[in-house]
Image (tube, rainbow, N blue to C red):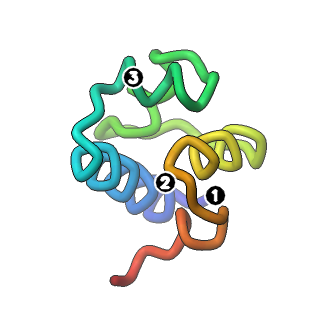
Amino acid sequence: MSKQVALLLGKRLKILRKRQHLTQEELATRAKINVKHLQRLEGKTPCRANIESLQSLADAFEMPLWKLVKFEE
């Protein structure tokens, strides 16, 4: 995953999370991932996301994985 893609993903996660009025802790709990991992994904220097984390986040947002990683709206 390139740095640019990681930044786009982080922005997308933050937008979706805020649309649902969720804190990072609430989303991490729903997605069954560590809140620190979510913070790193949404941060200014995001870490790489693995497919399992992405699927868990998509499930938490109740959307298919492809829709989670669709960066254009």
Between 5 and 51, the one lying in front of the other is: 51
Check disc 1 and report the residue beneath it.
Answer: 1
Whichever of callouts 1 and 3 sits on the residue coming sooner in the sequence is 1
Q: Is residue 16 left or right of residue 36?
A: left
Label 1 sits on what residue type?
A: Met
Cβ atoms at labels 2 and 1 below 8 Å apart? yes
Q: Nearer the viewer, residue 69 or 19?
A: 19
Q: Is residue 10 left or right of residue 15?
A: right
Disc 2 to disc 1, how far (Cα)?
A: 7 Å
- Location of residue 66 in the rendering, given as x and y in whole percent from the top left corner: 64, 72
At mark 3, the secondary structure is helix
Q: Which residue is mark 3?
A: 26
- Residue of label 2: 6
Q: Nearer the viewer, mark 2 or mark 3?
A: 3
- In the image, residue 68 above or below residue 60: below
Q: Is residue 65 above or below residue 14?
A: below
Query: Viewer-proximal residue, 59 or 42?
Result: 59
Q: Which kind of residue does numbered mark 2 sit on? A: Ala
- Amino acid type of the residue that numbered disc 3 sits on in the rendered structure: Glu
Q: Position of residue 52 (x, y in %)?
A: 77, 41
Taking the spot 28% from the left edge, 26% from the top edge, the residue there is 23
Residue 48 percent coordinates (x, y): 60, 42
Locate residue 60, reporting x and y percent: 55, 41
**What residue is shown at x 63% (from left), y 43% (from top)?**
49
Q: Is residue 47 left or right of residue 71?
A: right
Quadrant, the N terminus: bottom right
Tell me the SS state at disc 1: loop
- Mark 1 vs mark 3: in front: 3
Residue sitting farthest toward the right: 52
Q: Earlier in the sequence, mark 2 or mark 1?
A: 1
What is the number of the mark on residue 11? none
Task: Please tell me how crowded label 2 is: few (under 14), some (14-19), or many (20+) other residues with Cα within 10 Å.
Answer: many
